Image (cartoon, rainbow, N blue to C red):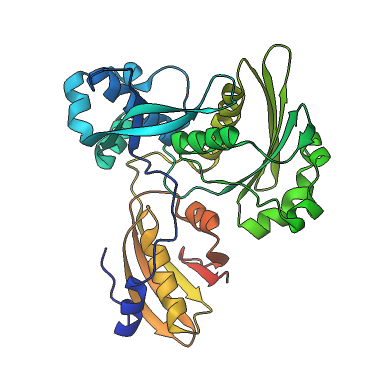
């Protein structure tokens, strides 16, 4: 991506700042569990690609690879690299961890996006709100806010599988002063608003996880942009109750932020106010460059504490990406379509 800032020192600073977005796993890297002595053939590749497609579309259930009718040769064309890795997974009862061998496959992002565009499926990009997940877990000792290592491992695994940025509260004195188990079990999401600000989360989620005679039940509550929703997920295992709720969280994000691949984006002017220091300019340049919908940016003018950029966009969703990142606040829209924004911090 090229930039032409007014002051070259700003550009040097911009190159030194890291990306504004980071997920626990790459969106286009899928994994497939391998049985003992199983060869990494087309079946394993299909399972790994299905994981990527679920992460991008939020569609679970039937295999999208099967629905698309992809031949083995088509699968191979999408593969960039593959290797065997070892993962720790909880056992069926959720009481311990076991080691699992998997095939990890890196797929071509452009090829996968084209696959979805051909079928007119909306795709969730790499800009995804962080999810602050509060837990109330029922055990023989009572109800607590802590999860055992196996449950934490399951949460991390589901976050990797679904491409979700899950934030777990520290459980320190400040957290405990704001949230109690009864708040989570009752789905009182208002009580978690202060902690969402503290952890920089865009979505609040609460899970009341209980063991029942039939297995497990997860009662989910979440809030995104002021809208509340929930889900009851009875299941035979704790992992299934967890995955059902987290899959619904992903679907919620796709419904809100998913865009159709391949749509033309054109150019967009953006006027950034409140740039008083060189490091702030560098932060803005690096942030805008990191957005998946931005193909290129140019500095058109700079005066006082404002810099005017022209962006080349690859598709829709630019304003949604700004809202997710919470780095630039939109304060006005000009008649010519230009956005006027200000640094949020």
**What residue is rendered at 44% in x and 56% in y?**
21
Q: How many marks?
A: 0
Residue drawn at the location 37% of the way across and 44% of the way down: 26
Residue 313, image x, y percentages: 35, 56
Depth check, front residue: 213 or 17: 213
Q: Quadrant location of residue 329?
A: bottom right
Residue 88: give x, y in percent of width and height: 45, 32
Residue 199: x %, y % from top left: 63, 56
Instruction: Compare residues 153 and 49 and report the one nearer the observer.
Output: 153
Q: Is residue 152 above or below residue 284?
A: above
What is the quadrant of residue 6 in the picture? bottom left
Residue 34 as seen in the image, left or right of residue 255:
left
Name the residue: 57% across, 22% down: 240
Q: Looking at the rendering, which quadrant does residue 241 occupy?
A: top right
Q: Quadrant of the N terminus?
A: bottom left
**Which corner quadrant holds the C terminus?**
bottom right
Residue 45 seen from this side: yes
Along the horizontal axis of the image, is 298 left or right of 240? left
Relative height, residue 253 to residue 179 (above, below): above
């Amino acid at each position: 991506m090229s930039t032409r800032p007014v002051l070259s020192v700003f550009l040097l600073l911009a190159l030194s700042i890291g990306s504004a977005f980071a997920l626990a796993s790459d969106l286009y890297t899928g994994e497939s569990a391998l049985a003992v002595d199983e060869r990494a053939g087309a079946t394993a590749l299909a399972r790994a690609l299905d994981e990527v497609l679920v992460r991008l579309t939020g569609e679970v259930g039937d295999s999208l690879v099967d629905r698309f009718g992809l031949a083995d040769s088509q699968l191979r064309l999408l593969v960039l690299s593959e290797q065997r890795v070892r993962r720790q997974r909880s056992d069926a009862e959720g009481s311990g961890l076991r080691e699992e061998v998997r095939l990890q496959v890196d797929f071509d992002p452009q090829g996968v996006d084209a696959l979805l565009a051909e079928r007119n499926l909306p795709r969730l990009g790499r800009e995804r709100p962080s999810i602050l997940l509060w837990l109330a877990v029922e055990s023989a000792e009572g109800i607590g806010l802590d999860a055992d290592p196996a449950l934490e491992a399951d949460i991390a695994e589901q976050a990797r599988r679904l491409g979700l940025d899950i934030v777990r509260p520290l459980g320190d004195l400040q957290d405990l002063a704001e949230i109690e188990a009864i708040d989570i079990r009752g789905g009182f999401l208002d009580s978690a608003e202060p902690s969402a600000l503290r952890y920089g989360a865009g979505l609040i989620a609460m899970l009341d996880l209980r063991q029942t005679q039939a297995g497990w039940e997860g009662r989910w509550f979440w809030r995104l942009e002021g809208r509340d929703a929930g889900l009851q997920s009875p299941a035979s295992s704790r992992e299934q109750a967890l995955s059902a709720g987290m899959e619904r969280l992903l679907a919620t994000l796709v419904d809100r932020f998913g865009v159709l691949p391949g749509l033309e984006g054109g150019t967009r002017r953006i006027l950034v106010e409140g740039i008083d220091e060189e490091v702030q300019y560098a932060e803005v340049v690096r942030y805008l460059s990191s957005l998946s919908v931005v193909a290129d940016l140019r500095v058109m003018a700079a005066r006082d504490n404002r810099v005017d950029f022209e962006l080349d966009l690859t598709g829709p969703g630019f304003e949604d990406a700004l809202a997710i990142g919470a780095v630039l606040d939109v304060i006005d829209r000009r008649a010519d379509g230009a956005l006027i924004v200000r640094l949020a911090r």
